[in-house]
Image (cartoon, rainbow, N blue to C red):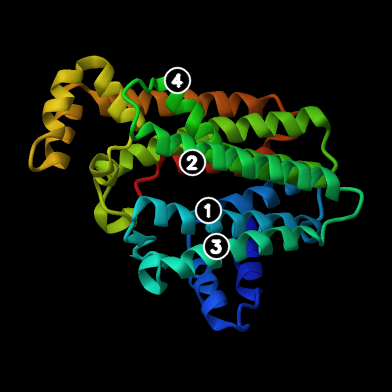
Amino acid sequence: MTPFETIQSAVQSLNWDKTPQGLYEPIDYALSSGGKRLRPALVIMASDMFGGNREKALPAALALEIFHNFTLLHDDVMDHAATRRGRPTVHKQFGTNAAILSGDQMLIEAYAQLEAIETDKLPQVIHWFSQMATQICEGQQLDVDFEQKTDVTIDDYLYMIRLKTSVLLANALRTGAYLANATTQQQNLLYEFGINIGIAFQLQDDLLDVYGNPDTFGKKIGGDIMEGKKTFLYLTAQAQNNNLLEKALKEKDKIHAVTQVYNQLDVRQTTEKEIVNFTNKALQCLDNIQVSDNLKQPLRDIAFKLTKRND
Protein backbone atom coordinates (compact mmCIF):
# COMPACT_ATOMS: atom_id res chain seq x y z
CA MET A 1 0.00 0.00 0.00
CA THR A 2 1.03 3.59 -0.49
CA PRO A 3 1.63 5.67 2.66
CA PHE A 4 -1.69 7.42 2.04
CA GLU A 5 -3.54 4.10 1.74
CA THR A 6 -1.89 2.88 4.94
CA ILE A 7 -3.04 5.99 6.80
CA GLN A 8 -6.53 5.95 5.33
CA SER A 9 -7.01 2.34 6.37
CA ALA A 10 -5.74 3.07 9.88
CA VAL A 11 -7.97 6.16 10.29
CA GLN A 12 -11.01 4.20 9.14
CA SER A 13 -10.26 1.49 11.70
CA LEU A 14 -10.41 3.92 14.61
CA ASN A 15 -13.49 3.28 16.74
CA TRP A 16 -15.60 6.33 17.58
CA ASP A 17 -18.77 4.34 18.24
CA LYS A 18 -18.66 5.21 21.92
CA THR A 19 -20.76 7.08 24.44
CA PRO A 20 -21.58 9.79 25.00
CA GLN A 21 -22.32 10.09 21.31
CA GLY A 22 -22.31 13.88 21.51
CA LEU A 23 -18.58 13.76 22.30
CA TYR A 24 -17.45 11.20 19.73
CA GLU A 25 -19.73 11.78 16.75
CA PRO A 26 -18.11 15.15 15.93
CA ILE A 27 -14.70 13.46 16.04
CA ASP A 28 -15.85 10.82 13.60
CA TYR A 29 -17.35 13.55 11.41
CA ALA A 30 -14.09 15.51 11.40
CA LEU A 31 -11.83 12.55 10.66
CA SER A 32 -14.12 11.07 8.01
CA SER A 33 -14.35 14.28 6.02
CA GLY A 34 -11.36 13.37 3.91
CA GLY A 35 -8.48 15.75 3.75
CA LYS A 36 -5.14 14.98 2.20
CA ARG A 37 -3.84 12.87 5.13
CA LEU A 38 -0.56 14.57 4.28
CA ARG A 39 0.92 14.91 7.74
CA PRO A 40 0.55 11.27 8.82
CA ALA A 41 1.67 10.12 5.37
CA LEU A 42 4.89 12.11 5.84
CA VAL A 43 5.65 10.07 8.97
CA ILE A 44 5.33 6.88 6.93
CA MET A 45 7.32 8.28 4.00
CA ALA A 46 10.18 9.34 6.25
CA SER A 47 10.18 5.95 7.96
CA ASP A 48 10.14 4.16 4.59
CA MET A 49 13.08 6.25 3.41
CA PHE A 50 15.29 4.71 6.09
CA GLY A 51 13.88 1.19 5.99
CA GLY A 52 11.62 1.57 9.00
CA ASN A 53 8.71 -0.60 10.07
CA ARG A 54 5.39 1.01 9.18
CA GLU A 55 3.58 -0.58 12.09
CA LYS A 56 6.02 1.05 14.49
CA ALA A 57 5.57 4.44 12.80
CA LEU A 58 1.78 4.25 12.59
CA PRO A 59 0.96 5.38 16.18
CA ALA A 60 2.92 8.61 15.67
CA ALA A 61 1.27 9.11 12.29
CA LEU A 62 -2.23 8.68 13.73
CA ALA A 63 -1.41 10.96 16.65
CA LEU A 64 -0.40 13.72 14.24
CA GLU A 65 -3.51 13.26 12.11
CA ILE A 66 -5.83 13.41 15.11
CA PHE A 67 -3.94 16.38 16.52
CA HIS A 68 -4.06 18.25 13.21
CA ASN A 69 -7.80 17.78 12.94
CA PHE A 70 -8.23 18.88 16.55
CA THR A 71 -6.54 22.19 15.67
CA LEU A 72 -8.92 22.61 12.73
CA LEU A 73 -11.97 22.26 14.97
CA HIS A 74 -10.77 25.05 17.22
CA ASP A 75 -9.38 27.18 14.37
CA ASP A 76 -12.75 27.10 12.65
CA VAL A 77 -14.49 28.25 15.81
CA MET A 78 -12.01 31.11 16.22
CA ASP A 79 -12.27 32.08 12.54
CA HIS A 80 -16.09 31.68 12.44
CA ALA A 81 -15.54 29.44 9.39
CA ALA A 82 -18.68 27.95 7.87
CA THR A 83 -17.16 25.25 5.66
CA ARG A 84 -14.20 22.90 5.76
CA ARG A 85 -13.35 20.44 2.99
CA GLY A 86 -16.53 21.34 1.16
CA ARG A 87 -18.98 20.69 3.99
CA PRO A 88 -20.13 22.41 7.20
CA THR A 89 -17.50 22.83 9.88
CA VAL A 90 -17.97 20.90 13.11
CA HIS A 91 -19.23 23.90 15.04
CA LYS A 92 -21.80 24.60 12.32
CA GLN A 93 -22.90 20.96 12.21
CA PHE A 94 -22.91 20.17 15.94
CA GLY A 95 -22.58 23.51 17.73
CA THR A 96 -19.70 25.49 19.21
CA ASN A 97 -19.68 23.63 22.52
CA ALA A 98 -19.34 20.31 20.71
CA ALA A 99 -16.48 21.61 18.58
CA ILE A 100 -14.60 22.80 21.66
CA LEU A 101 -15.15 19.71 23.81
CA SER A 102 -14.69 17.15 21.02
CA GLY A 103 -11.57 19.03 19.99
CA ASP A 104 -10.25 18.73 23.53
CA GLN A 105 -10.92 15.00 23.42
CA MET A 106 -9.07 14.72 20.12
CA LEU A 107 -5.99 16.22 21.74
CA ILE A 108 -6.22 13.58 24.47
CA GLU A 109 -6.74 10.86 21.86
CA ALA A 110 -3.63 12.06 20.00
CA TYR A 111 -1.45 11.59 23.06
CA ALA A 112 -3.11 8.22 23.72
CA GLN A 113 -1.97 7.04 20.29
CA LEU A 114 1.65 7.81 21.24
CA GLU A 115 1.44 5.26 24.06
CA ALA A 116 1.96 2.48 21.48
CA ILE A 117 5.41 3.77 20.47
CA GLU A 118 8.41 1.70 21.51
CA THR A 119 9.44 2.51 25.08
CA ASP A 120 12.98 3.59 24.23
CA LYS A 121 11.71 5.99 21.55
CA LEU A 122 8.74 7.38 23.42
CA PRO A 123 10.36 10.17 25.51
CA GLN A 124 11.90 11.87 22.48
CA VAL A 125 8.72 11.56 20.40
CA ILE A 126 6.58 13.02 23.19
CA HIS A 127 9.06 15.84 23.73
CA TRP A 128 8.95 16.79 20.05
CA PHE A 129 5.17 16.38 19.94
CA SER A 130 4.63 18.69 22.92
CA GLN A 131 7.12 21.21 21.57
CA MET A 132 5.29 21.18 18.23
CA ALA A 133 1.91 21.59 19.91
CA THR A 134 3.13 24.64 21.85
CA GLN A 135 4.61 26.22 18.73
CA ILE A 136 1.35 25.74 16.84
CA CYS A 137 -0.58 27.47 19.63
CA GLU A 138 1.97 30.29 19.60
CA GLY A 139 1.56 30.61 15.85
CA GLN A 140 -2.22 30.68 16.16
CA GLN A 141 -2.04 33.44 18.76
CA LEU A 142 0.30 35.49 16.57
CA ASP A 143 -2.16 35.05 13.70
CA VAL A 144 -4.93 36.43 15.91
CA ASP A 145 -2.72 39.26 17.15
CA PHE A 146 -1.80 40.28 13.62
CA GLU A 147 -5.44 41.07 12.81
CA GLN A 148 -5.28 44.06 15.15
CA LYS A 149 -1.69 45.16 14.50
CA THR A 150 -0.78 47.68 11.82
CA ASP A 151 2.98 47.12 11.81
CA VAL A 152 3.17 43.44 10.81
CA THR A 153 6.07 42.74 8.45
CA ILE A 154 6.55 39.98 5.90
CA ASP A 155 9.24 38.49 8.16
CA ASP A 156 6.74 38.50 11.05
CA TYR A 157 4.27 36.67 8.85
CA LEU A 158 6.79 34.07 7.70
CA TYR A 159 7.73 33.39 11.32
CA MET A 160 4.06 32.99 12.24
CA ILE A 161 3.33 30.47 9.49
CA ARG A 162 6.51 28.59 10.36
CA LEU A 163 4.95 27.99 13.78
CA LYS A 164 1.32 27.59 12.77
CA THR A 165 1.83 25.41 9.68
CA SER A 166 5.39 24.26 9.05
CA VAL A 167 6.40 22.71 12.36
CA LEU A 168 3.69 20.04 12.07
CA LEU A 169 5.00 18.90 8.69
CA ALA A 170 8.58 19.12 9.90
CA ASN A 171 7.88 17.14 13.06
CA ALA A 172 6.06 14.44 11.09
CA LEU A 173 9.14 13.92 8.93
CA ARG A 174 11.66 14.06 11.77
CA THR A 175 9.63 11.66 13.89
CA GLY A 176 9.28 9.14 11.08
CA ALA A 177 13.02 9.27 10.42
CA TYR A 178 13.82 8.93 14.13
CA LEU A 179 11.59 5.88 14.51
CA ALA A 180 13.47 4.30 11.59
CA ASN A 181 16.84 4.99 13.26
CA ALA A 182 18.01 7.67 10.83
CA THR A 183 21.02 9.71 11.91
CA THR A 184 20.55 13.02 13.71
CA GLN A 185 21.81 14.85 10.62
CA GLN A 186 19.27 13.07 8.43
CA GLN A 187 16.49 13.86 10.90
CA ASN A 188 17.46 17.54 10.93
CA LEU A 189 17.62 17.79 7.15
CA LEU A 190 14.14 16.31 6.88
CA TYR A 191 12.95 18.73 9.55
CA GLU A 192 14.24 21.68 7.51
CA PHE A 193 12.72 20.20 4.38
CA GLY A 194 9.39 20.18 6.21
CA ILE A 195 9.80 23.76 7.46
CA ASN A 196 10.47 25.12 3.99
CA ILE A 197 7.86 23.09 2.18
CA GLY A 198 5.37 24.05 4.90
CA ILE A 199 5.99 27.75 4.27
CA ALA A 200 5.62 27.19 0.53
CA PHE A 201 2.41 25.26 1.22
CA GLN A 202 0.93 28.09 3.29
CA LEU A 203 1.88 30.71 0.71
CA GLN A 204 0.11 28.60 -1.89
CA ASP A 205 -2.89 28.41 0.43
CA ASP A 206 -2.88 32.19 0.72
CA LEU A 207 -2.77 32.42 -3.05
CA LEU A 208 -5.64 29.99 -3.50
CA ASP A 209 -7.77 31.91 -1.01
CA VAL A 210 -7.80 34.72 -3.56
CA TYR A 211 -7.27 32.97 -6.90
CA GLY A 212 -8.46 29.42 -6.26
CA ASN A 213 -11.44 27.60 -7.74
CA PRO A 214 -14.32 27.86 -5.25
CA ASP A 215 -15.67 24.50 -6.46
CA THR A 216 -12.50 22.65 -5.42
CA PHE A 217 -10.83 24.82 -2.77
CA GLY A 218 -13.24 23.70 -0.04
CA LYS A 219 -13.44 27.15 1.57
CA LYS A 220 -14.98 30.44 0.54
CA ILE A 221 -12.76 32.39 -1.84
CA GLY A 222 -11.69 35.72 -0.36
CA GLY A 223 -12.17 34.63 3.24
CA ASP A 224 -8.77 36.01 4.29
CA ILE A 225 -9.61 39.40 2.79
CA MET A 226 -12.98 39.55 4.57
CA GLU A 227 -11.40 38.59 7.90
CA GLY A 228 -8.58 41.12 7.56
CA LYS A 229 -5.88 38.45 7.62
CA LYS A 230 -2.34 39.77 7.23
CA THR A 231 -1.38 37.23 4.58
CA PHE A 232 1.73 37.35 2.41
CA LEU A 233 -0.38 38.84 -0.39
CA TYR A 234 -1.82 41.52 1.87
CA LEU A 235 1.57 42.49 3.32
CA THR A 236 3.22 42.56 -0.10
CA ALA A 237 0.54 44.92 -1.40
CA GLN A 238 0.73 47.02 1.76
CA ALA A 239 4.49 47.43 1.38
CA GLN A 240 4.09 48.60 -2.22
CA ASN A 241 1.06 50.89 -1.97
CA ASN A 242 -0.70 51.01 1.37
CA ASN A 243 -3.01 53.86 0.35
CA LEU A 244 -4.32 51.90 -2.61
CA LEU A 245 -4.89 48.83 -0.43
CA GLU A 246 -6.63 50.81 2.33
CA LYS A 247 -8.98 52.36 -0.21
CA ALA A 248 -9.88 48.93 -1.60
CA LEU A 249 -10.60 47.59 1.88
CA LYS A 250 -13.30 50.24 2.30
CA GLU A 251 -15.13 49.29 -0.89
CA LYS A 252 -18.50 47.57 -0.66
CA ASP A 253 -17.25 44.59 -2.70
CA LYS A 254 -14.06 44.32 -0.71
CA ILE A 255 -12.93 40.99 -2.14
CA HIS A 256 -13.13 42.21 -5.73
CA ALA A 257 -11.50 45.55 -4.93
CA VAL A 258 -8.57 44.06 -3.03
CA THR A 259 -8.04 41.41 -5.71
CA GLN A 260 -7.84 44.17 -8.30
CA VAL A 261 -5.15 45.87 -6.23
CA TYR A 262 -3.24 42.60 -6.02
CA ASN A 263 -3.45 42.30 -9.80
CA GLN A 264 -2.31 45.86 -10.30
CA LEU A 265 0.72 45.38 -8.02
CA ASP A 266 1.70 41.94 -9.40
CA VAL A 267 1.22 40.43 -5.96
CA ARG A 268 0.31 37.05 -7.42
CA GLN A 269 3.60 36.84 -9.31
CA THR A 270 5.58 37.92 -6.24
CA THR A 271 3.91 35.23 -4.14
CA GLU A 272 4.55 32.57 -6.77
CA LYS A 273 8.25 33.49 -6.79
CA GLU A 274 8.42 33.05 -3.02
CA ILE A 275 6.71 29.67 -3.29
CA VAL A 276 9.41 28.59 -5.74
CA ASN A 277 12.10 30.00 -3.44
CA PHE A 278 11.00 28.03 -0.38
CA THR A 279 10.37 24.92 -2.45
CA ASN A 280 13.93 25.07 -3.76
CA LYS A 281 15.26 25.45 -0.20
CA ALA A 282 13.31 22.35 0.78
CA LEU A 283 14.60 20.34 -2.16
CA GLN A 284 18.18 21.35 -1.34
CA CYS A 285 17.75 19.82 2.11
CA LEU A 286 16.44 16.65 0.51
CA ASP A 287 19.37 16.55 -1.91
CA ASN A 288 21.79 16.60 1.03
CA ILE A 289 20.36 13.43 2.57
CA GLN A 290 22.61 10.52 1.70
CA VAL A 291 20.16 7.88 0.55
CA SER A 292 19.34 6.70 -2.95
CA ASP A 293 17.30 9.05 -5.13
CA ASN A 294 14.45 6.60 -5.55
CA LEU A 295 13.88 6.65 -1.77
CA LYS A 296 13.65 10.46 -1.83
CA GLN A 297 11.36 10.63 -4.85
CA PRO A 298 8.07 10.39 -2.89
CA LEU A 299 9.00 13.55 -0.99
CA ARG A 300 10.00 15.32 -4.20
CA ASP A 301 6.60 14.39 -5.59
CA ILE A 302 4.91 15.76 -2.46
CA ALA A 303 6.83 19.02 -2.74
CA PHE A 304 5.67 19.42 -6.32
CA LYS A 305 2.05 18.60 -5.54
CA LEU A 306 1.85 20.94 -2.57
CA THR A 307 3.25 23.93 -4.41
CA LYS A 308 1.50 23.34 -7.74
CA ARG A 309 -1.92 22.42 -6.39
CA ASN A 310 -5.03 24.36 -7.35
CA ASP A 311 -7.30 23.28 -4.49
The three-letter code of the residue at mark 1 reads Thr
Q: Nearer the viewer, residue 150 or 246?
A: 150
* SS of the residue under disc 3: helix
The three-letter code of the residue at mark 4 reads Asp
Q: CA distance from mark 4 to mark 2?
A: 16 Å
Q: Quadrant of the N terminus?
A: bottom right
Question: Which disc is residue 140 wearing?
Answer: 2
Q: Picture quarter containing residue 234? A: top left
Q: If you read the primary sequence from the N terminus, does the residue marked by circle 4 or circle 3 appear first?
A: 3
To which residue does mark 1 refer? 71
Question: Which disc is residue 151 wearing?
Answer: none
Q: Is residue 280 above or below residue 132?
A: above
Residue 7 is at least partly visible in this image: yes
Residue 62 in percent (x, y) is at 67, 60
The reply to whether callout 4 and callout 1 are in contact (CB within 8 Å) is no
To which residue does mark 3 refer? 103
Q: If you read the primary sequence from the N terminus, does the residue marked by circle 4 or circle 1 appear first?
A: 1
- Residue in view at x 45 percent, y 23 percent: 156
Q: Picture quarter containing residue 230? A: top left
Residue 299 is at least partly visible in this image: no
* SS of the residue under disc 4: helix
Q: If you read the primary sequence from the N terminus, does the residue marked by circle 2 or circle 3 appear first?
A: 3
